[in-house]
Structure formats: C-alpha cells, structure tokens
Image: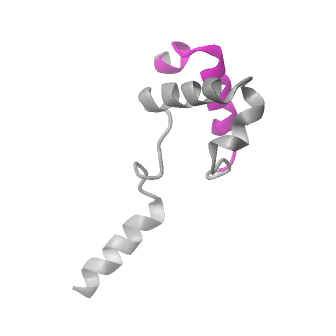
Amino acid sequence: MNTFLKLDTLSKTIYARMFFRKRFWYTHPSQLKSYAETDSELDNALKTLYKAKLLKSDEDSVYETDYEKIHELFECM
C-alpha cells in the first residue's frame, strides 16, 4: 500500500483502472490512452508502475496454467 501511495496521480489512476478490470483486460498500452494527455505521459506512468513492481510484462509473468503444463511435461519425461 505504501508503494501505491507514493506514486504520482496518473500512475495511481492507471493502476486502479487495471486493478479493477478482469485479468488480461488491457493487452496493449494503447488501450489506456484515454487516461493520459500524451503518449510519453502514459509511457512514463507505465514505467513507474513497472519499476514499483505493480505491473508485469508478458515476459515476467508465469500464468497459473503454465504450472500445469510444466507438470505435464515432467510426467512425459
């Protein structure tokens, strides 16, 4: 919570919008354009959230079904 409270207003707004949506709702940053006046403003807010570890990229994420797939692969070996 302290991390969230230290964020700038735009970063808090974007995080709150993403938090209250279903998983994978926002698949591309362009879907969040209406919350920022410029692309660079949005980009900076997303970078702030990423640095605060409140946002992950696809490369960082391990989805719940991946654990099942990994388990299945090990059973096949």
Q: Quadrant of the C terminus?
A: bottom left
Task: Please name the colour scheme applied to the rendered image.
Answer: one colour
- Residue 72 sits in which quadrant? bottom left
Q: Position of residue 12 (x, y in %)?
A: 62, 22
Q: Taking 16 as reference, is 8 above or below it?
A: above
Residue at 46% x, 60% y is: 64
Foreground: 50 or 5?
A: 50
67 on left or right of 77: right
Q: Taking 39 as reference, is 6 above or below it?
A: above
Which residue in the rendered view is the most extreme toward the bottom?
A: 76
Q: Main secondary structure of the magenta part?
A: helix
Residues rendered magenta in the picture: 3-22
Foreground: 15 or 68?
A: 15
27 on left or right of 7: right
Q: Taking 66 as reference, is 38 above or below it?
A: above
Question: Total number of numbered labels?
Answer: 0
- Residue 33 sits in which quadrant? top right
Foreground: 5 or 58?
A: 58
Residue at 51% x, 12% y is: 6
Which residue in the rendered view is the most extreme toward the right?
A: 34
Residue at 61% x, 26% y is: 40
Q: Taking 6 as reference, is 60 above or below it?
A: below
Q: Position of residue 26 (x, y in %)?
A: 66, 47
Whether 41 is among the magenta residues is no
Residue at 58% x, 25% y is: 45
Q: Position of residue 19 (x, y in %)?
A: 63, 37
